[in-house]
Amino acid sequence: MINIWEVNETNEMIEKENLDVRTITLGISLLDCIDSDLDKLNQKIYNKITTVAKDLVAVGKEIENNYCIPIVNKRISVTPIALVGGAACKCPEDFVTIAKTLDDAAKKVGVNFIGGYSALVSKGMTTADENLIRSIPRALAATDFVCSSVNVGSTKTGINMDAVKLMGEIVKETAECTKELDSLGCAKLVIFCNAPDDNPFMAGAFHGVTEADAIINVGVSGPGVVKTALSKVRGENFEVLCETIKKTAFKVTRVGQLVAKEASKKLGIPFGIIDLSLAPTPAIGDSVADILCEIGLEHAGAPGTTAALALLNDQVKKGGIMASSYVGGLSGAFIPVSEDQGMINAVEAGALTLEKLEAMTCVCSVGLDMIAIPGSTKATTISGIIADEMAIGMINQKTTAVRLIPVIGKDVGEIVEFGGLLGYAPIMPVNQFSCDAFVNRGGRIPAPIHSFKN
């Protein structure tokens, strides 16, 4: 039974500590929409999404009203479009028509984003994969709600360096195609290693081929709740610190479990997973960096930051996993720059660099996320950064990702405004030494020795 003290405690978290359910994401398989006729394919995709997801937003709002729990986003993820469009799409322009169909469907049902304009190319690229990847800049420029992701590596297969090289070029082209919006298209493009099939968070969500026809995945978030809890044990030892984080993560995840079960029941769609990530927002008091400061750092980026983040991530997982039937997705702590006011403050203070962020990604949930860099940065340099991050994921058997935004026309020290949950970011400097010869080698980096488990 839930007692009145727990009810009051949860209300306090929601009203004063920015606790929310960040997203209900409805995953939809489009495999049964495959058709060799492009017009028929687009019609089938539109019909299926608008049918399966027709009640998603209304149900989300009903749960919000019934339980007074903020549900910030209602989203859709679909089967990677490179798989769905392969039979009908003969060129990149054909894939762009599917992106527009996804956008139209998202607008029809009223969701915030739709993810799955994706390709999985960790070992090699089919013609369809390459056509989709080459279409990404135009697709993201021509749509409002479509998000794209490309998985270029895994612990089992290694890193597809041909795809890594291509993605550096695609990021630059996407920045150019959306330069009138401060290269905003790049905020909707993620490059992954070990991408999970059930991630509810954008821009990297897609509905994996291992999933059911439709599934409900929920992402919870409560950096402000964790920060407030830690402020009450300031100066205590690490045992007390860890116990506090675990107990708080348990409470936060229970809220997500409740919402997920209710959404599943009302929509008649199976519950998939809870992603128990600490996902920050630009709001004051909703920052992962502030948690690191509460642990004892002057700024995120100070010596001890990687250890503090490792501790936080591990305790969140330990506490959250006991609170839900199924935990999946990314689960841990996100460290985006533009979406976290504390991270922005650390960059502006000179405490946080791109290299330190990379070190932190060894122990966080994802990777180099929402980082604005000079628009003049070379494509090969972006590919080199992607390769570094993919190597961290491959060797450590974890998901890593890159979401870099080379802002055309802006340079180090300038500010770029994205608005909403995407926030704003200072342009960060990038190492200017060349990696051209490395990136241009071509081929694959083999899987690590510990990948051989058979």
Image (cartoon, rainbow, N blue to C red):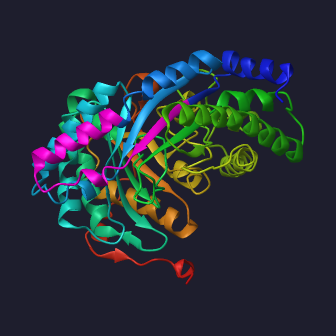
Question: Where is residue 437 shown, x and y percent of the image?
Answer: 28, 70
Q: Where on the picture, by quarter, is residue 188?
A: top left
Q: Quadrant of the N terminus?
A: top right
Reply above or below: 275 against 283.
below
**Is 309 part of what is drawn in magenta?**
no
Foreground pick, 246 / 302: 246
* Magenta residue check for 37: yes
Q: Position of residue 293 (x, y in %)?
A: 70, 34
For the point 34% across and 75% down, the residue is 444
For the image, the number of numbered tags is 0
The magenta segment is 22-51
Left or right: where 206 falls relative to 126? right
Q: Nearer the viewer, residue 349 or 60?
A: 60
Question: For residue 122, what is the image quadrant?
Answer: bottom left
Asked whether residue 122 appears in the rendered view, the answer is yes
Quadrant placement of the C terminus? bottom right
In the picture, measured across the screen, residue 306 lies left or right of residue 372, that is: right
x and y percent of residue 263 in the render?
A: 55, 32
Say which residue appears at 42% left-offset and 44% top-offset. 27
For image coordinates 57% across by 20% down, the residue present is 64
Image vertical order of residue 395 relative to residue 30, above or below: below
Q: Which residue is more in the foreground, 242 or 378?
A: 242
For this view, does 355 lie left or right of residue 114?
A: right
Give the residue drawn at x 46%, y 32%.
Answer: 338
Quarter of image, res 98: top left
Residue 407 visible within the image: no
Q: Position of residue 300 (x, y in %)?
A: 63, 39
